[in-house]
Image (cartoon, rainbow, N blue to C red):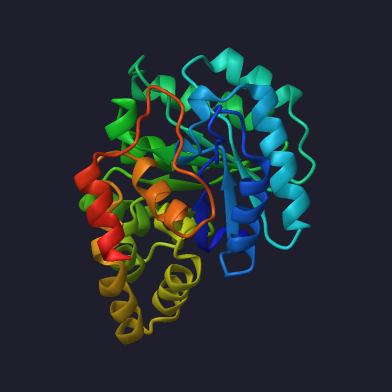
Amino acid sequence: MERFRGTGVAMVTPFAADMTIDQDALRKLTEHLVSNGVNYLVVMGTTGENPTISTFEQDKIRSIVGEVNENRIPIVFGVGGNNTASVVERLNQLDYSGIDGILSASPYYNKPNQAGLIEHYHRLADASKAPIILYNVPGRTGSMMALETILKLAEHENIIGIKEASGNWVHCMDLIRLRPEGFLVISGDDNYTLPYLAAGMDGVISVVANAYAKEFSQMVRYGLDGNFENARYLHYKLLPMMNAIFDDGNPGGIKVVLEAMDICKGHMRLPLYPVKQEVADKIKSLM
């Protein structure tokens, strides 16, 4: 579990102008992250636009990231959906070479009850050859994972933690207080990461760290070490950018920064669309 403490990065997927995967930019992004101190990579999360990327392309992306990474840091692969049988089939067929963990968001749109969520994740955890990290993000899924549900799932030997993006502070603190030993609680909100670390979380899966990998990772290390004076300095230095990149949708905002840094272009597949010009101008001014 220590492999997933600290800063994970929810990697964007670079696209060329014709909307094919920009493999050179993906290699450049991967090296940028690995060489600037992040603790692990998350491939094919929401920030990676996985709903519009075929399974063939997803596997190619994972392969390229793995080649560049050369086992320097762990890789978490996003596998999820709202059809349990299809997700289980995907996990059964997956090539797990180079995959250290699976991140799986709570099923969206169907709005299952808590018993359905427990059964869904139990079946995924039974099928997966890599440990599962739950992902609670009700703003995207329309379904909140209850505290009791998470604690029940934490009893499964192949479920090792949760990415918490509920924004519910009381829920998160109760989870930190009641979780079993070794169960990871990971922030899914960049701007809440430092206070979450102070409350006892184990790290973050970050969007802004796609660009500011070195600075954000150092902030997290300071927070985990209890050096909150230095952590606060970096937190408040990065906070305006953390907020701005989400002003008109993710990953449009962070791709503005990455394009300005000459790491990748800002192209996204529909229905995602580039941020409004005034938002792009604000983001660039903050750089």
- Residue at 67% in and 55% down: 74
The answer to whether residue 213 of the structure is visible from this angle is: yes
To which quarter of the image does residue 273 belong?
Answer: top left
Horizontally, is 2 left or right of 217 in the view?
right
Residue 59 image position (x, y, % from top left): 70, 32
The reply to whether residue 99 is in sight is no
User: In terms of depth relative to the viewer, which is nearer, 66 or 139?
Assistant: 66
Residue 217 placement (x, y as % from top left): 48, 69
Left-right relation of 72 to 81: right
The one nearer the camera, 275 or 164, is 275
Q: Which quarter shows the C terminus?
A: bottom left
Residue at figure coordinates x 38%, y 22% from the top left = 271
Instruction: Pinpoint residue 174: horizontal percent, then vertical percent.
Output: 29, 53
In this view, the residue in front, 56 or 123, is 56
Where residue 87 sits, quadrant-wise, is top right
**Residue at image location 25% in from the left, 73% down from the top:** 236
